[in-house]
Amino acid sequence: MYVRKKKNRSGTISVVVVSKSSGKYEEIKSFGTTNGAKDAENLCDATQRRLVPTPVNKHSTLMTIKGGNRKKPNV
């Protein structure tokens, strides 16, 4: 999982946590929307601090979001 800035049609910038598997991006959680690039950077930094590496086994780790639940996928 990592933090991504996504430009919207309206010109705003959304900050989201995404996961990439099988060549596709899956949006895990949206953390906010802003109009300015500097505000987007601040929001990205705050979001990055909420991602916590959690060890799964001795060879890999899983990133989890502190204080949030995973968004359910649309079926």
Image (tube, grey):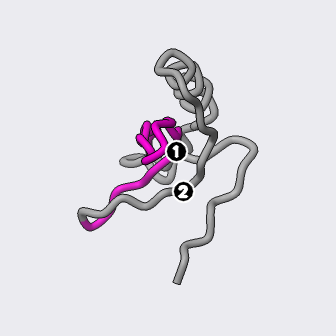
Residue at image coords 42%, 54%: 19
Circle 1: is it few (<14), some (14-19), or many (20+) Cα within 10 Å?
A: many
- State the mark number for residue 28: 2
Q: Which residue is mark 1?
A: 16
Residue placed farthest to the bottom in the image?
75
Magenta extent: 1-22
Q: Amino acid at mark 2?
A: Ile
Q: For the residues labelled 2 and 1, say whether their Cβ atoms are less than 8 Å apart.
A: yes
Residue 7's quadrant in the figure?
top left
Q: CA distance from mark 2 to mark 1?
A: 7 Å
Does the magenta segment cover residue 51? no
- Characterize the magenta stretch by its predominant secondary structure: strand
Residue at image coords 55%, 73%: 73
Between 13 and 61, the residue placed more toward the observer is 13
Does the magenta segment cover residue 14? yes
Position in image of residue 74 (x %, y %): 54, 77
Residue placed farthest to the left in the image?
23
Position in image of residue 28 (x %, y %): 54, 56
